[in-house]
Image (cartoon, helix red, strand yellow):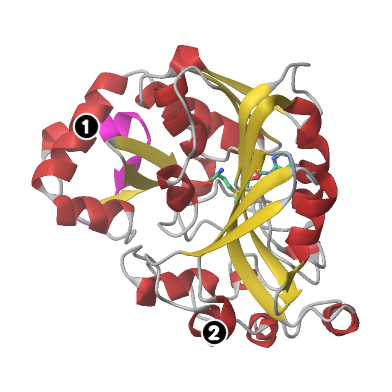
């Protein structure tokens, strides 16, 4: 069963070689197997090391099927759980408009000491380590840490990343960092029990973000920067998470990168996918009472400064809006491909279907 897989990192060179050859010469087979989660035939010399590592398993006839999702990012292979994996502790699959977006916008410098809070598969830690050299990465999910460990070895960065099992900052050594980076859980949910650990973030979705903003100050060097990607409710021009940023970083220069067109995002659309959930009624009342009518998706870059300033930027790469994403009926579990925006919509389906409903 895919849920019980234990990744075997004994033959890393052969695994990397097999993945590279597959990606280079048979890109569509790579995508079919590792992104679409479909069955496919494989040459023996590619299949064998991947089988040994438990990345794939035999499918029907002479076909193979993947146990994991594999994302190719900047010459790196990052292994996560499958999109269709129903475990509550699923290792967060990578999406172009989130984890990979953050990777492409990292403000990491050579020799920076970096802390990656909520590392998941380790994608940001790995991309930072390549540039900076020293990274500490934490996650509360042991399964995520084991995948991050595998990915660290697969990308030849074993000695450079220290992985720590920790509830946010609880187990981080007393030291200060040049950069703290985080893609934390930020999904506002009416009922946390029935949601993935990687997303579940309380009624307003900011339960974890609040703690990171509050605690990270203690871990930043005087010139240290913080990058955090999140969803946030808000009313027009009053983004909830910005109030928190102002509160905890009153002297800072903020870059707010909107990942979606903020004018078109109505929180109402967001709510529909949770209808039928326990606490749905009281959750809706909470949002109404607090005027949380809009949903924003933002990357927040925080730089130290003499006084507070805010610069808002609209990202042009992803053209879809939250309306388009959420105006969908719940869908059944099906293969997923991170290509264009249409496919991305699928990621926002009713995940409680995966977890068996409430
Ligand atoms: C949205 S995923 C992001 C993973 C990865 N950084 C990425 O961008 O793909 C959030 C991660 O936060 C972890 N997490 C949730 N609560 C946490 C906590 N209290 N302390 C540390 N990590 C936590 C989850 O296990 C998950 O791996």
Residue 234 in the image: x percent, y percent? 74, 74
**Direction from residue 313 to residue 243 in the image, left or right:** right
Across and down, in percent, residue 8 comes to 41, 26
Q: Nearer the viewer, residue 115 or 6?
A: 115
To which residue does mark 2 refer? 323
Whether residue 7 is visible here, answered yes or no, is no
Location of the C terminus (image quadrant) = bottom right
In the displayed structure, 332 sits above or below 65; it is: below
Residue at image location 75% in from the left, 45% down from the top:
307
Q: How many marks?
A: 2
Q: Which mark is residue 86?
A: none
Image quarter for ligand 1 = top right
Q: Magenta segment, which residues? A: 49-63
Seen at 67% across and 38% down, the residue is 141
Dot 2, how many residues are within 10 Å of its Cα: few (below 14), some (14-19), or many (20+)? some
Q: Looking at the image, do the residues carrying marks 1 and 2 touch, with CB atoms under 8 Å apart?
A: no
Relative placement, left or right, of 82 versus 296 is left
Label 1 residue SS: helix
User: CA separation, marks 1 and 2?
Assistant: 44 Å
| The one of 209 and 3 positioned closer to us in this rendering | 209
Residue at left offset 19%, top offset 33%: 18
Residue at position x 51%, y 71% from top? 260
Q: For residue 230, which quarter of the picture?
A: bottom right
Tag nearer the camera, 1 or 2:
2
The residue labelled by disc 1 is: 48
Q: From the viewer's side, name the closer residue of 196 and 334.
A: 196
* Residue 248, visible in the rendered structure: yes
Residue 33, percent from left and from top: 27, 53
Q: Is residue 59 magenta?
A: yes
Quadrant of the rendered structure where residue 78 is?
top left
Neighbourhood count class around disc 1 (C-alpha, 10 Å): few under 14, some 14–19, many 20 upward: some
């Amino acid at each position: 069963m895919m849920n019980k897989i234990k990744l075997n990192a004994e033959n890393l060179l052969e695994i990397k070689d097999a993945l590279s050859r597959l990606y280079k010469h048979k890109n569509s087979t790579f995508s079919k197997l590792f992104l679409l989660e479909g069955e496919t035939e494989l040459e023996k010399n590619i299949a064998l090391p991947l089988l040994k590592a438990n990345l794939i398993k035999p499918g029907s006839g002479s076909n193979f099927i993947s146990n994991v999702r594999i994302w190719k990012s900047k010459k790196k292979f990052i292994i996560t759980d499958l999109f269709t994996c129903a475990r509550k502790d699923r290792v967060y699959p990578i999406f172009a408009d989130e984890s990979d977006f953050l990777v492409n916008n990292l403000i990491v410098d050579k020799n920076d000491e970096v802390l990656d809070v909520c590392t998941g598969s380790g994608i940001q830690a790995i991309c930072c380590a390549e540039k900076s050299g020293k990274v500490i990465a934490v996650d509360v999910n042991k399964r995520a840490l084991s995948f991050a460990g595998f990915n660290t070895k697969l990308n030849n960065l074993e000695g450079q990343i220290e992985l720590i099992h920790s509830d946010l900052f609880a187990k981080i050594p007393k030291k200060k960092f040049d950069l703290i980076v985080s893609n934390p859980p930020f999904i506002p949910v009416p009922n946390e029990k029935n949601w993935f650990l990687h997303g579940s973030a309380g009624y307003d979705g900011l339960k974890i973000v609040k703690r990171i903003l509050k605690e990270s100050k203690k871990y930043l060097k005087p010139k240290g920067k913080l990058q955090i990607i999140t969803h946030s409710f808000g009313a027009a021009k009053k983004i909830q998470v910005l109030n928190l940023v102002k509160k905890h970083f009153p002297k800072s220069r903020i870059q707010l990168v909107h990942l979606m067109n903020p004018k078109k995002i109505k929180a109402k659309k967001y709510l529909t996918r949770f209808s039928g959930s326990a606490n749905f009624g009281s959750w809706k009342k909470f949002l109404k009472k607090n005027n949380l009518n809009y949903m924003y998706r933002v990357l927040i870059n925080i730089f130290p400064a003499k006084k507070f300033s805010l610069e808002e930027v609209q990202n042009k790469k992803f053209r879809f809006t939250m309306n388009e994403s959420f105006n969908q009926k719940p869908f059944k579990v099906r293969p997923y491909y991170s290509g264009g925006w249409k496919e991305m919509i699928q990621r926002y389906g009713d995940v409680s279907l995966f977890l068996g409903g409430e």
